[in-house]
Image: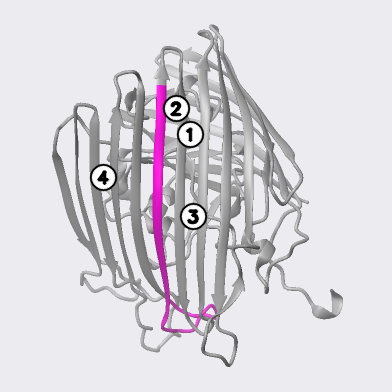
């Protein structure tokens, strides 16, 4: 059992006035969906959501998604300030990668061959997204296993009203260690995008490329020449087509092909010519039907990921992950709305390595064994009173092909009022989360353990937020998180096993 207690300091965030698009229609920037899957004003939301806007992303063309997130209060992306190809660790409220869910356009994305089943943010450039949001706290009711400490939601860029539009950018920068004061160009970023719409149709294509000669992942001993740089190269291409019918139905499909190569050194902090190559092919889709009092939404994503590690311990991985999330959001009255949905996830992977003294790859894990399915129904209810009291509550049944069923729930009351020109909001929540072990943690022949139990989390939070929705917000939030059946890698003494 592990108990984590933390109080955040004063958090000051700025939002730029503007509009974003969700499911094909414009919504005011003040409208939030992430914490309830119901359109709410930020004043009526019982959570504090951190938003990185399109304007902020555009102002930092050299920054990656990880670097932008790392600058947000209460979020630490370990490795984002290192060399370009450094592995990333997501730390939010004491949680790590396996306790953070990443969404792209409303649907979860994972890599089942990763130790923590997490998605690698190095694959996608920040310029592909118009908005990045972070919802802190347990959100397993709406987003399933893994959403114990945060949900990171990435929203792809949408087309404007033009029939045809073109955008292109190139940026150059230096990337030196504190010992090197040169001004040579080490980083190149290129992005090009075309898109538009006509008579209900919309289309877009974006291509991004980045090349970084980089820094060495390890420092040379004092007085010795610097180790060779560890370069990082990546590209991604995404094509999207959609159509909006006159009856409120809209559909879209996107295909992404992304790849990066990252040089890295040995884990014992010695210089080496190791290379990691990762390739992603991903097909995403959205179907939304809107009617007067609600909407039906189906988001899906299929990801195929292949990783190749060239080092003293060469290995290869390929994984498949399919997720679909469908829900019905209905506004029964001015005060009362519901979300009824089902989320399904299907995962499997293969792994290969070269045994010591041999030259050919052998298969260590077979996707016929290393696979599991998750199919979870869920219900969420939102109540908005006329006098400032709001309630967001829900329940989810986790059904897993390898584990017994489990129930998670949350209750999130809040109260908002006016203080002159400012909005003031008092919030509280009690929520539970459920995290099943990853396929790697279960089936890897060297590190896996089939006896692992799912992890359970409980989070209590309370806080105060004051500000103007379209300009700034100051918030103070206390939280207390309790972990049970915590999963971690440990080194065991064979004499005491």
Residue 270: in magenta span:
yes
In the rendering, at what x and y percent does residue 90 appear? 52, 54
Tell me which label, 4 or 3, sits earlier in the chain: 4
Question: Disc 4, disc 3: CB below 8 Å?
Answer: no
Q: What is the span of residues highlighted in magenta in the rendered image?
A: 264-289
Q: Nearer the viewer, mark 1 or mark 2?
A: 2
Check whether the beta carbons of the residues at disc 1 and disc 3 lie within 8 A of each other.
no
The residue that mark 1 highlights is: 49
Decide which of 377, 139 is in the foreground and name it: 377
Q: Which residue is mark 3?
A: 119
Q: How is the image coloured?
A: one colour
Q: Nearer the viewer, mark 1 or mark 3?
A: 3
Return the residue at label 4: 58
Regarding mark 4 in the picture, which secondary structure is present there? helix
In the image, what residue occupies the spot 56% across and 48% down? 100
- Compared to residue 327, the image places residue 434 above or below, namely below
Structural distance between the alpha carbons of marks 1 and 3: 21 Å
């Amino acid at each position: 059992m592990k108990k984590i207690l933390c109080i955040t300091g004063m958090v000051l965030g700025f939002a730029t006035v503007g509009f974003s698009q969700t499911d094909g229609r414009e919504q005011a920037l003040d409208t939030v969906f992430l914490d309830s899957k119901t359109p709410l004003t930020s004043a009526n939301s019982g959570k504090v959501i951190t938003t990185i806007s399109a304007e902020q992303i555009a102002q930092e063309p050299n920054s990656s998604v990880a670097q932008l997130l790392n600058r947000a209060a209460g979020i630490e992306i370990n490795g984002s300030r290192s060399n370009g190809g450094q592995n990333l660790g997501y730390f939010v409220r004491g949680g790590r990668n396996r306790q953070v869910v990443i969404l792209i356009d409303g649907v979860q994305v994972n890599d089942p061959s990763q130790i923590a089943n997490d998605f690698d943010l190095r694959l996608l450039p920040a310029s592909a997204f118009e908005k990045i949001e972070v919802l802190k706290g347990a959100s397993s009711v709406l987003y399933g296993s893994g959403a114990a400490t945060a949900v990171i939601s990435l929203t792809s860029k949408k087309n404007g009203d033009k029939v045809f539009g073109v955008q292109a950018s190139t940026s150059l920068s230096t990337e030196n260690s504190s010992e090197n004061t040169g001004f040579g160009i080490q980083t190149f970023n290129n992005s090009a995008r075309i898109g538009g719409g006509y008579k209900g149709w919309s289309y877009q294509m974006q291509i991004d490329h980045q090349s970084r000669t980089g820094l060495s992942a390890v420092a040379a001993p004092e007085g010795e020449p610097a180790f060779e740089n560890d370069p990082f190269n990546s590209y991604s291409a995404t094509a999207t087509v959609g159509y909006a019918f006159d009856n409120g139905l809209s559909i879209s499909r996107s295909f992404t092909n992304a790849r990066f190569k990252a040089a890295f050194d040995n884990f014992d902090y010695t210089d080496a010519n190791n290379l990691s190559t990762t390739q992603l092919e991903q097909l995403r889709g959205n179907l939304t039907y809107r009617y007067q009092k609600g909407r039906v939404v189906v988001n899906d994503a299929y990801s195929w990921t292949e990783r190749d590690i060239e080092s003293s311990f060469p290995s290869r991985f390929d994984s498949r992950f399919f997720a679909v999330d469908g829900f019905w959001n209905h506004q029964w009255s001015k005060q009362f709305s519901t979300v009824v949905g089902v989320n399904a996830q299907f995962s499997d992977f293969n792994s290969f390595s070269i045994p010591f003294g041999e030259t050919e790859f052998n298969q260590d894990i077979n996707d016929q064994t290393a696979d599991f399915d998750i199919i979870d129904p869920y219900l969420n209810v939102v109540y908005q009173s006329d006098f400032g009291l709001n309630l967001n509550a829900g329940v989810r049944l986790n059904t897993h092909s390898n584990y017994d069923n489990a129930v998670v729930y949350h209750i999130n009351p809040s109260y908002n009022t006016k203080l002159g020109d400012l909005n003031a909001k008092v919030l509280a929540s009690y929520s539970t989360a459920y995290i099943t072990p990853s396929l790697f943690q279960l089936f890897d022949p060297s590190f896996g353990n089939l006896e692992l139990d799912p992890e359970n989390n409980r989070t209590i939070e309370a806080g105060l937020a004051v500000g103007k929705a379209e300009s700034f917000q100051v918030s103070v939030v206390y939280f207390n998180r309790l972990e049970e059946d915590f999963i971690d890698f440990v080194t065991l003494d064979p004499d005491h096993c």
